[in-house]
Amino acid sequence: MVLIPFLYEVLLPKDHFSMINLAAPVGYGDPTFFAETLQSCYLPAGYTSDVFWTLLVAKYHGWPGGASSIAVIIVGICLFIVAYKYIKWRITASYLAATTVFSMIMYVVYGGDALLRLCFHLFVGSSIFLAFFMATDPATTPLTYSGQCIFGFGLGVLTVLMQTYMNFLGGSILALVIMNLTSPLLDRAGLQKPIEEKVEKKLPKGKQFETIKTTSCIRCGACMVVCCHNLSPILIKEAFDKGNSKVLKKLRADLCDGCGNCTFVCPARIDLRNFTLRAKASLRTAKN
């Protein structure tokens, strides 16, 4: 909380000439003149535009990714379609849902125009850009599904509260900084039930089998990052389980040298090295 005044000065774009009082009725004809104030924050002097056009299409300010909310939504949806297995869409969905719900709560408390208040909280500043891109960063967000939902919910609540009571148009960015600090704790929420699996020990004079606990893949991508040959061990495992030799060739499973880095870093404790080497052997057998 000590850093909030500093962040306020650093993150607030210099072209915001006036502030909006959200702890009051929001509408076109109310005493706060919300729509006019909003346009004076965003638009050059002497330029007029519909407030919804301003929020959705042509925002004039310095927030990252804030030039056009419609463009951000289109690109974000396309990215989700292309890489849906690796994008943490639960954070985006829970963030948008929480922002919508708490915007309506503020509407009930203070009155005014519900749609105008909702559009403000969703599309002002970098809120919509954060929902699709910044909030789904794999390095600073929870790994578990439940943790991701809680993360997105908390992000939405903090965004609405900061923008309403702090007059901080970039509340979503500061909320993300705060929620990132909770990621280690949220990783403990919704841990998947372990699955017992028997693996062969390779240590001399060791037991023949050792029981370890593994979980389903959480799509963290750690195995791909540490692979010496830029392979995708988890995708190779899935293709090997399905017996799909064509996919194994495309994934270049034959390049694996058995370093074991993928198995070492896997938080689900999946023996990716063993599966990848078996896939490599199956490709050689099919080739011969």
Image (cartoon, rainbow, N blue to C red):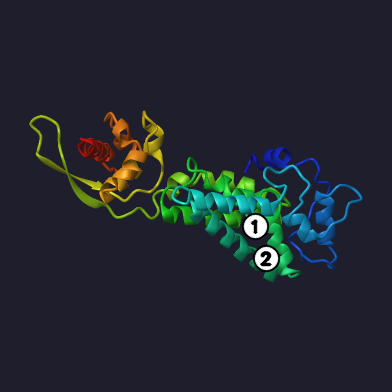
**Residue furthest out toward the right:** 46
- Residue 273, position as x, y percentages in the image: 27, 36
Q: Which mark is residue 106?
A: 2
User: As drawn, is 274 to the left or to the right of 76?
Assistant: left
Residue under the point 56% across and 57% down: 95
User: As drawn, is 251 to the left or to the right of 136?
Assistant: left
Q: Amino acid at mark 1?
A: Val
- Residue 33, position as x, y percentages in the image: 84, 62
**Residue furthest out toward the left:** 205
Q: Is residue 67 above or below residue 232?
A: below
Q: Earlier in the sequence, mark 1 or mark 2?
A: 2
- Residue 252, position as x, y percentages in the image: 34, 36
Residue under the point 64% across and 67% down: 105
Q: Is residue 104 above or below residue 144?
A: below
- The reply to whether discs 1 and 2 touch (Cβ–Cβ < 8 Å) is yes
Residue under the point 85% across and 58% down: 36
* Whether residue 187 can be seen here: yes
Q: Amino acid at mark 2?
A: Met
- Residue 155, position as x, y percentages in the image: 57, 53
Query: Where does the N terminus fall, quadrant-wise?
Result: top right
Task: Name the residue carrying label 1.
Answer: 160
The residue lying toward the viewer, choosing from 182 and 169, is: 169
Crowding at mark 1 (Cα within 10 Å: few <14, some 14-19, many 20+): many
Q: Helix, strand, or loop for circle 2?
A: helix
User: As drawn, is 224 to the left or to the right of 244?
Assistant: right
The residue lying toward the viewer, choosing from 250 and 93, is: 250
**Residue furthest out toward the front:** 288
Q: Which mark is residue 257?
A: none
Crowding at mark 2 (Cα within 10 Å: few <14, some 14-19, many 20+): many
Residue under the point 65% across and 57% down: 160
Distance between the alpha carbons at the discs numbered 1 and 2: 9 Å
Q: Helix, strand, or loop for circle 1?
A: helix
